[in-house]
Amino acid sequence: MSRPSVALFDLDGTLIDTAPDFIRCLNMIRARYNLPSLPHQRIRRHVSDGAKAMIRVGFDLLPEDDDYFDRHAEFLDLYESEIAVETRLFPGMDKVLQWLEVQGVPWGIVTNKPRRFTVPLLAALDLAERCDAVVCPDDVDYRKPHPEPLLLGAHLAKANPEGGVYVGDHQRDIESGRRAGMTTIAARYGYIAEPADVPSWEADVTIDSARELLAWLEQG
C-alpha cells in the first residue's frame, strides 16, 4: 500500500510495554496476602485483557466472587499510583513514530484502557503532545472489536480510515480494524496467550518487532 492516511495503535502490548508494571503491582498485592510471586510470563500473556484478567490470574477470582471487587480496586489504585515506573515504548517504536511524524502521517492510540490510566501514562512517557488522537472506552458507546473506536480515532486525526492502518496484539484489534476498513497489522511480539493462533486472526500483515513495522512502512 502507499503511505497510510493515519496510523493507529493499540496501547498495551503494541505501542508500549506496560507488562513490567502490571507484573510488579500484581505481585506486590499478592505479597500483602502472603502469597508468592507469580512467574512474569504467566502474568504477561494476559496483560492485554486488563485488570479483570489480572485478578483472575493473581487470585483466581471472578466478578461473582466475594473478594473480587476489593482485590480489583486494590490493584487499580496501586497501578494508578505507579503507572510508569518500568513501562516504556517497545524497542524501536520511537523510530516508527519519528518516521510517521517526518512523513506527515498522523498517528494515534485506540485502546480499551480507561482514560483514568491512559492519559497520565501518555503524559509520563512524553507521548501526549505527540499523538493526534487518543480514544479510550470512555469516549465511545462500543469497545473494540466494534469499529466505532477506530473510526473516531481516524476522525480525530482528520484522516480517511480506509487509507489507514491499525496495529494490535489481540484478535479483537484485528477484527476492529477490519470492520473499520483499515489495513490490519498483528503485533506478534505483544501479550498473546497463544502466539500460534495469530494466523487465524487473518491480519493483513504480521510483525514480530517494531523494526519490522518500520520496514513495512518504508516499503509502502
Image (cartoon, rainbow, N blue to C red):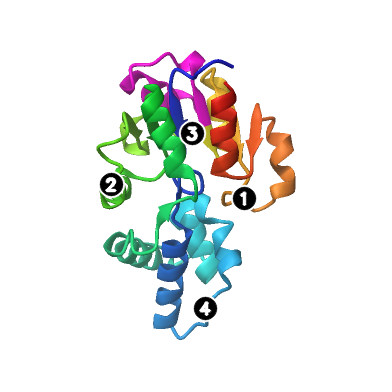
Find residue 93 and report its horizontal and vertical position in percent. 47, 43
Give the residue number, with chain letter if any, for mark 2. 126
Q: Is residue 206 left or right of residue 86?
A: right
Give the residue number, with chain letter if any, for mark 1: 192
Q: Quadrant of the C terminus?
A: top right
> Which of these two is toward me, 163 or 104?
104
Residue 197 vertical placement versus 66 (above, below): above
Mark 2 or 3 closer to N-term? Answer: 2
The amino acid on which the numbered mark 4 sits, given as a three-letter code, is Ser
- Residue 120 percent location from the top left of the image: 26, 50
User: Which label's residue is closer to the chain start, 1 or 2?
Assistant: 2
Residue positioned most to the bottom: 34
Labels 4 and 3: the sequence-earlier one: 4
Magenta-colored span: 144-166
Compute the Cα span from label 2 to label 4: 31 Å
Tag 4 and tag 3, C-beta contact below 8 Å: no
Label 4 environment density (alpha carbons within 10 Å; few <14, some 14–19, many ≥20): some
| Residue, disc 4 | 37
Total residue callouts: 4
Residue that badge 3 annotates? 144
User: Does residue 102 lie above or below 65 as drawn?
Assistant: above
Residue 148: in magenta span: yes
Few, some or many residues within 10 Å of mark 3 (<14, 14–19, 20+): many
Q: Answer whether residue 209 is magenta in the image.
A: no
Instruction: Indicate left or right for 186 with 15 as reference.
Output: right
Q: Which percent across, then down, holds residue 16?
A: 44, 49
The quarter of the displayed image where residue 211 is located: top right
Q: Residue at x 37, y 65 (%)?
A: 75
Please name whichever residue, 126 or 214, is drawn nearer the observer in this view of the structure.
Answer: 214
